[in-house]
Amino acid sequence: MGGSTRYIWSLFKKDLLLEVRQQYTFYGVLLYVASTIFVLYLSMGEPEGAVWKGLFWMIQLFICVNAVAKSFLQEGRGRLLYFYSIAGARDFILSKLLFNALLMLLMSLVSLFLFTLMLGNPLAHPISFLLLSGLGGVSLSLVFTFLAAIAARAQQSAALMAILGFPLIIPQLMLLNKASTIAFEDVVQGGLGSMLALIAGLDLMIVALAIILFPFLWKD
């Protein structure tokens, strides 16, 4: 267990150092988020709560596709063979899941800040939505990391991600949208805890599927 943790941490640091040195992914996504929200501000001003919420999760989805889904596409065959020789498949996929989850968590907080700065703050319970946006960003990153791991082994990777991602991501977005509605209501409503638990359960299921299935792709 200790050796596995060491490999996961080493692979995580590798991705972190590459991101710090290159920085094109982070600043590219940051430019995309800021410019998109600014265009929305010029077009709509400060929209009502329902529109604000829908735009937020739509932006989160596109952020995840741009920031997370490319994580496996930048790994060449020779580099993967090297990682195969020094670490196990489970260590590799867990390090990717961890790094992308933290990256998407940061992007979610940045996008939430820019949304409230430019498009106003219609939230009745900002703390609840802050927790939900962070959990939602992590959930989206786990799904797309898992899909990117599968698609990277295929020839038509982009098409495969679209085909596999649609039935997986739509129920999750619907659940996040329904849960976030509570944060916009003035009257305190129940059910948020159960929805958060359901989202966390889906995240654990994605992690378990990645740990079980990725070793078979790794050996291919």
Image: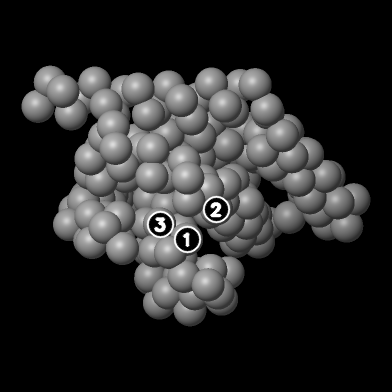
Identify the disc placed on residue 152.
1
Which residue is disc 2 drawn over?
A: 73
Q: What residue type is labelled 1?
A: Ala
The earlier-in-sequence mark between 2 and 3 is 2
Q: Which amino acid does label 2 sit on?
A: Leu
Rendered residue at 43%/64% (across/down):
153
| Image-quadrant location for residue 128 | top left
Identify the disc placed on residue 149.
3
Check if mark 2's residue and mark 1's residue have beta carbons within 8 Å. Answer: yes
Q: Is residue 30 above or below residue 74?
A: above
Q: In this view, does 92 lie above or below 53?
A: above
Q: How far apart are marks 2 and 3 (CA)?
A: 9 Å
Check if mark 3's residue and mark 1's residue have beta carbons within 8 Å. Answer: yes
Badge 1, how many Cα within 10 Å: few under 14, some, many 20+?
A: many
Q: What residue type is labelled 3?
A: Ala
| Image-quadrant location for residue 209 | bottom left
Q: In this view, does 21 lie to the left or right of 156?
A: right
Badge 3, how many Cα within 10 Å: few under 14, some, many 20+?
A: many
Q: How far apart are marks 2 and 1 (CA)?
A: 6 Å
Badge 2, how many Cα within 10 Å: few under 14, some, many 20+?
A: some
- Residue closest to the eye, 49 or 132: 132
Q: In which quarter of the image is the C terminus?
A: bottom left
- Residue closest to the eye, 11 or 168: 11
Q: How far apart are marks 3 and 1 (CA)?
A: 5 Å
- Residue closest to the eye, 10 or 200: 10
**Position in image of residue 186 (x %, y %):** 47, 47
**Position in image of residue 102 (x %, y %):** 44, 32
**Mark 1 secondary-structure assignment:** loop
Q: In this view, does 21 lie above or below 189?
A: above
**Position in image of residue 132 (x %, y %):** 41, 44
Rendered residue at 57%/27% (across/down):
18
Q: In this view, does 168 lie to the left or right of 55?
A: left
